[in-house]
Image: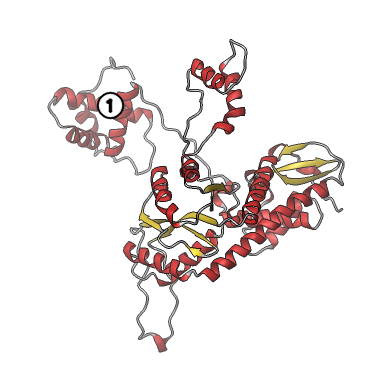
Amino acid sequence: MNDDQPSCSGTDVVCVLGASPVRKNAKGKLVCSRQKELVINIYKSQLLEHPDIKYKELVLKVSKLTGVGRTTIVKTISEYKKNGVLRSPNKTRNRDKVSDKVDKYDKYAVRRKIHNIWFKRQIPTLNKILASVNKDPKLPNFSRSTLHRLLNDLNFVHSKRGRNSGLIEKDEIVIGRNTYLEQIRKYRADGRAVYFLDETWVNAWDGPDKTTQSSRDSSQKKSAAKPSGKCKKRLISLDIGSEDGFVPGGLLAYESDDEMNERTFFDWIKGVLPLLKDNCVIVMDNAPHHNAKATAGPTLNWNKADIEKWLEKRGEVFEKPTIKVRLMEMVKRIKPTYDKYVVDEYVKEHNRVILRLPPDHSELNPMESAWSVVKDHVKMKNTTFELQDVHRLVRDGIGRCTPEMWKKFSRQTIKEENRLWEIDFVVDEVMENVCPTKTTNLGEASWDTDTDYDS
């Protein structure tokens, strides 16, 4: 918008808008660039007429004259002051990915269905998987196209062998999983204690479902009704355990509307390390706050000369001049060797080691089962929906999750580890019986060649 453009005075606005009452902009409705322009014109006009007016009062006045909400007025003024121009809002709707709508337990179940087909020494096809998934009443009913997108998000690819087309997991997923299983097997064989940590949300509004009481027990006290939508408080809870149970004193639980941050997690790990056995292994997932870098490597925002120095310091030889993107390719190739995480380095100094779970394999963490026990206890006993009572119930639930339960969860985890270790060898065995050809992403594959291996 041009600053030299004539702007209407306060009197002009009253004349124009005074013919009929100002219509308020509907809540949630996008404010177009023309409305933003009007807001700025009136804002300037009022500043000229009332140079001593307070900002809060000015915003309120502009809001009344335009019908636009005060929050939008503040954002519009801020945008204009920062950029000097006003942009139309983005009207493109951000659609959720299929994988965001399917919870991790259903994703695990779908992957298990595919593995079961492999264990039958058959090659999974989209039709076979669809029939198996939709036959299970515990899983959502997928259309063929929706399941196709979900499998793509779960890192499955088409492997074409002659006239046949099967679904296998991407190489990086298989390699990451196989490496993890190899490491944890070695740690157990060496007799090292293995601890698992995990975070979860506990909602203050979770409680027992209402049930209709018969007349004979109507005199008994009923559970308190669940609170309305106003109560949205929740605890983020972090703890650690092994086959001996939850580690006493390991719980961190606090009210939060956001994810845990790196600082909070690092402070917790420093406090919990003395509670763990010496020379132990700590297993955790790849959540962002677990992966704070101790040393930051080059990015495209770095100066070219600094990237060259970083590479030369690490013994890389290259011709000069070399374009920046080629230098970054070299960085990408060697960076994993030099990447160090803050938590890993601290734990190593205290004679422990961190082991990260392969992505999207929460079934390999017995803490998932332990938290399920705790959250079920909270849900059954929560009648006040007060956060302090929920906090107490979390502690009670942890106490009820006995070492015997933990040993059961650990046995289930090891059984799952063995199954995942075996599946990759089964895939190799079956695929070797089919003439080799290429592998493609699901998005590139043709569904018309969905021929069953055993047909």
User: Residue 237: x and y, percent?
Assistant: 42, 56
Picture residue at 79% right of the left edge, 36% below the top: 438
Question: Considering the image in quadrants, where does the N terminus appear?
Answer: top left
Mark 1: amino acid: Ile
- Is residue 413 something one can see in this rendering? yes
- 380, 241: nearer the viewer: 241
**Taking 113 as reference, is 156 above or below it?**
above
- Judge left or right: residue 66 versus residue 433: left
Q: In the orientation shown, which residue stands out farthest toward the bottom?
A: 216
Q: Quadrant of residue 78?
A: top left
**Taking 323 as reference, is 206 above or below it?**
below
Q: Secondary structure beneath disc 1?
A: helix
Q: Which residue is mark 1?
A: 40
**Taking 290 as reference, is 234 above or below it?**
below
Picture residue at 41% right of the left edge, 48% below the top: 270
- 382, 173: nearer the viewer: 173
- 39, 70: nearer the viewer: 70
User: Residue 10: x and y, percent?
Assistant: 18, 27
- Is residue 130 something one can see in this rendering? no
User: Residue 206: x and y, percent?
Assistant: 42, 64
